[in-house]
Amino acid sequence: MNDSTMQKVKFTDVEQVQPPVNETVVPVSGGGRAMIQSSPIARIFLPVAIFAVLAGVGTGYLLSTKLSFPTKQSATQGGKTTTPVAQSIKVGDTFGSKDDSTFKDSAEGVLLVGGVNGEGSYHVVREGGESQNVYLTSSVVDLGLFVNHKVTVRGETFKAQKAGWLMDVGQVKILELNAQLPAWAQKALEKQEKSAGGSQ
């Protein structure tokens, strides 16, 4: 035997030792099968990740349903406090904070849905034109209950980027139910309805 054949023999006689690999056979679309190697880290990580996701979803569900803390709104009627329902709103009812002196700013007009350029969710339409609108937000009072009613809103004015006047409302007083819009707003609404009807 020469040296080159001796090396070959030695090389082929040596066993390579590798750590055991766990392989899983998984069916693949098209009828084939694929071998997937899994490491011990992957076998631990996957159940932990699934548990974390399920725990997060479960916690979120519990917090949103059973442990929620809804904000209560109240109306003052002749000294009695009641919870508002859209059908039971009456002229003279006051919703939100009971203390008039808490808020230094107030505005009166017909409350409608919609802000301006992302500022406010609602607005109060007042005499004098669109520039007199007051755009509103509130974390205390559900302003949606008072849409189309003439109201006095009390709150705090915030600096606005686009709106002429932006107010965080803390109190709403009902002045008139299903109130008529000011003349300028009526005309603007009719014009908008005509242009929408003509484009159909």
Image: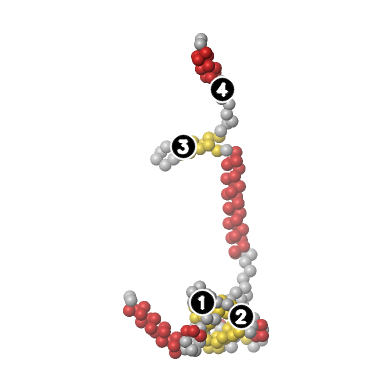
Q: Amino acid at mark 2?
A: Glu
Residue 173 placement (x, y as % from top left): 58, 85
Secondary structure found at label 4 = loop
Comparing marks 2 and 3, which lies closer to the viewer? 2
Q: State the residue position of label 1.
A: 162
Q: Check the image and report above or below for 52 versus 26.
A: below
- The span from disc 1 to disc 2 (Cα, nearest Å) is 17 Å
Secondary structure found at label 3 = strand
Q: Is residue 117 left or right of residue 169?
A: left
Q: Residues within 10 Å of mark 2 (few under 14, many from 20)?
A: some
- The span from disc 1 to disc 4 (Cα, nearest Å) is 78 Å
Secondary structure found at label 1 = loop
Q: Amino acid at mark 1?
A: Lys
Secondary structure found at label 2 = strand
Q: In the image as oriented, which residue stretches furthest toward the top?
A: 1
Residue 114 placement (x, y as % from top left): 49, 77
| Label at residue 34 | 3
Q: Amino acid at mark 4?
A: Glu
Comparing marks 1 and 2, which lies closer to the viewer? 1
Q: Mark 2 vs mark 3: which is more N-terminal? A: 3
Q: Image point 53% across, 88% down: which residue?
A: 176
Comparing marks 3 and 4, which lies closer to the viewer? 4
Q: Mark 4 vs mark 2: which is more N-terminal? A: 4
| Label at residue 156 | 2
Q: Image point 47% across, 87% down: which residue?
A: 129
- The span from disc 3 to disc 4 (Cα, nearest Å) is 27 Å
Is the residue under label 1 in contact with that under label 3 (CB below 8 Å)? no
Towards the viewer: 125 or 76? 125
